């Protein structure tokens, strides 16, 4: 039995890496870089 690939298949990503949406620490450039590297980039939505 091989590794479970459901997460990679669901999001169509190469690597099972999900960037946490971090307010004021991440941003568009970081999300794009993670996505370009094959992971799932995220943007923070609720910044106070």
Image (cartoon, rainbow, N blue to C red):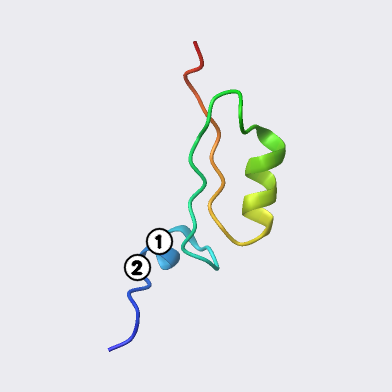
Question: Counting other residues with Cα less than 10 Å from the Cα at mark 1, is it few (<14), some (14-19), or many (20 or more)?
Answer: few
Q: Position of residue 14 (x, y in %)?
A: 55, 68
Relative placement, left or right, of 11 versus 31 is left
- Marks 2 & 1, CB-CB < 8 Å contact: yes
Residue 40: numbered disc? none
Extreme residue in the bottom direction: 1
Secondary structure beneath label 2: helix
Q: Tell me the quarter of the picture where residue 27 sits.
A: top right
Relative placement, left or right, of 32 versus 44 is right
Q: Position of residue 2 (x, y in %)?
A: 33, 86
Residue 10: numbered disc? 1
Q: Which residue is mark 2?
A: 6
Question: Counting other residues with Cα less than 10 Å from the Cα at mark 2, is it few (<14), some (14-19), or many (20 or more)?
Answer: few
Indicate whether 19 appears above or below 26. Answer: below
Relative placement, left or right, of 16 versus 5 is right
Q: Position of residue 45 (x, y in %)?
A: 50, 24
Indicate whether 11 appears above or below 46. Answer: below
């Amino acid at each position: 039995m091989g590794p479970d690939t459901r997460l990679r298949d669901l999001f169509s990503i190469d690597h099972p890496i999900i960037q946490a949406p971090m307010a004021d620490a991440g941003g568009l450039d970081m999300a794009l870089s993670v996505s370009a590297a094959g992971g799932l980039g995220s943007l923070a939505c609720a910044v106070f």
